């Protein structure tokens, strides 16, 4: 398959995979002292919608190398960060703007 | 203080590197006039980023943060389209590069090309600019005492350091001969475009519109961490990530040969046109 068609097929597959997918929402707050809860649990392979709320007075950046996500959240706002299909393990995340705030997603 | 400087350095690095490639390319092509367009795009982006950053802080922000992220993804993908068209255009007209563009009948096309470069500079700066503004605003808000101006200064110094890093990076290119230089920067621009495409796809995955297919195809963190200097440079320039998803890898890998094919066709077209037209002396 030529590269443009390969990409198109992959994109359609990726799009279709989300349409019927069941998702579970988990609330994750960022407070002055850190993440609340500091650990989030999930089942292997499930589609998770992390609702990250910034409860501090300054912008935060939800970031994770393991999850390959980064998102800036203005103070007082909530964003939705999706992760799916994860294998069992511990995936750390942190606030890139205040790196003492750390947490983890534990997938069983 | 140091943290603020380092964070701003990282946030500004990608923009500085991409703008640096464009400026270096134009300078060496003898198109100094075109550099004004790139500067205009970059400065316009700083203004727009400040405006958007401050606006999104308020509760009355028109677009929610998720909608803004979707907009950023769209802007990234549009930038890839524009940049791809740029590279093909430059290839097709390699013989006229540095020559007298005023003699070309389609001057509008030439101006359009420079506007396209300004658009790339705009996107590169705007994207990280909004994050940088939000970050600095937070720094100011958190320290209502007298240390705020000092922290702001540290932030600006971080951005300045990114510009210096980019300048140093591209000084190394000055030692290349012209042909090698264009080949290297051409490849770099393609990798940058592939990186922007991958970043756009990553944002759409994070927003839930696309499935990663498989979230971690490999893990190269043992080889190169994203928070190392080289990792940060590569991450900023070509979108290097240690744990990419399958969809992102496919996007990156599909883009390169697709562009290679387009450039090959452009080269053939350029060669055909050169054979039909009388030879022009090089600039």
Image: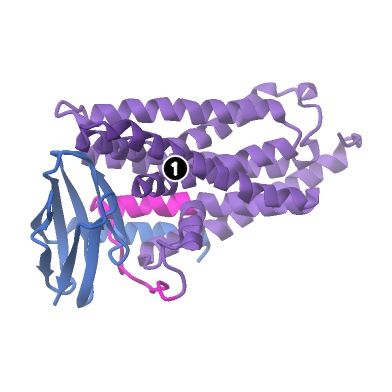
Horizontal placement of B30 versus B76: left or right? right
- Check the image and report above or below for B45 versus A35: above
Q: Which residue shows up at 15% across the image and 72% down it?
A: A106
> What range is drawn magenta here?
B195-222
Verify whether residue A74 appears in magenta: no
> Which of the 4 quarters of the picture holds residue B69?
top left
Q: Is residue B70 visible?
A: yes
The N terminus of chain B is located in which quarter? top left
Q: Give the number of callouts.
A: 1
Percent position of residue B56, x then y: 24, 31
Q: Which residue shows up at 51% across the image and 62% down it?
A: B230
Colour for chain A in the figure: blue
Q: Chain of mark 1?
A: B
Verify whether residue B220 appears in magenta: yes
Q: Which residue is mark 1?
A: B158
- Pick the residue in front: A12 or B82: B82
Considering the numbered disc 1 on the image, is that residue within a helix, a strand or a loop?
Answer: helix
10 Å crowding of disc 1: few (<14), some (14-19), many (20+): many
């Amino acid at each position: 398959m030529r590269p443009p068609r390969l990409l198109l097929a992959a994109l359609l597959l990726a799009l279709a995979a989300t349409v019927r997918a069941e998702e579970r929402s988990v609330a994750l707050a960022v407070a002055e002292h850190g993440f609340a809860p500091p650990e989030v649990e999930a089942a292997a392979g499930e589609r998770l919608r992390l609702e990250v709320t910034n409860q501090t007075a300054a912008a935060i950046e939800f970031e994770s190398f393991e999850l390959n996500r980064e998102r800036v959240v203005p103070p007082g706002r909530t964003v939705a960060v999706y992760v799916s299909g994860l294998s069992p393990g511990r995936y750390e995340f942190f606030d890139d703007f205040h790196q003492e705030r750390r947490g983890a997603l534990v997938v069983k | 203080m140091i943290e603020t400087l380092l964070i701003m350095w990282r946030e500004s690095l990608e923009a500085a590197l991409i703008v640096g490639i464009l400026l270096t390319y134009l300078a060496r092509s003898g198109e100094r006039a075109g550099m004004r367009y790139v500067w205009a795009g970059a400065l316009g982006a700083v203004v727009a980023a400040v405006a958007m950053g401050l606006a999104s802080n308020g509760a009355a922000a028109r677009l929610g943060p998720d909608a803004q992220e979707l907009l950023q993804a769209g802007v990234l993908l549009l930038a890839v389209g524009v940049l791809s068209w740029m590279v093909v255009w430059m290839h097709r007209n390699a013989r006229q590069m540095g020559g007298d563009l005023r003699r070309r009948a389609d001057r509008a096309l030439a101006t359009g090309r420079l506007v396209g470069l300004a658009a790339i500079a705009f996107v590169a700066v705007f994207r990280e600019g909004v994050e940088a503004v939000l970050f600095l605003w937070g720094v100011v808000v958190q320290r209502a005492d007298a240390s705020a101006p000092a922290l702001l200064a540290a932030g600006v110094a971080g951005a300045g350091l990114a510009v210096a890093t980019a300048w140093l990076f591209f000084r190394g290119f000055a030692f290349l001969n012209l042909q090698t230089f264009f080949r290297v920067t051409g490849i770099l621009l393609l990798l940058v475009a592939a990186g922007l495409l991958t970043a756009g796809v990553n944002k759409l995955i994070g927003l839930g519109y696309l499935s990663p297919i498989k979230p971690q195809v490999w893990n190269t963190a043992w080889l190169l961490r994203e928070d190392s200097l080289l990792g940060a440079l590569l991450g900023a320039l070509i979108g290097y990530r240690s744990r990419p998803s399958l969809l992102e890898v496919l996007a990156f890998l599909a883009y390169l040969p697709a562009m290679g094919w387009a450039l090959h066709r452009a080269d053939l077209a350029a060669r055909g046109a050169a054979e039909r037209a009388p030879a022009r002396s090089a600039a």
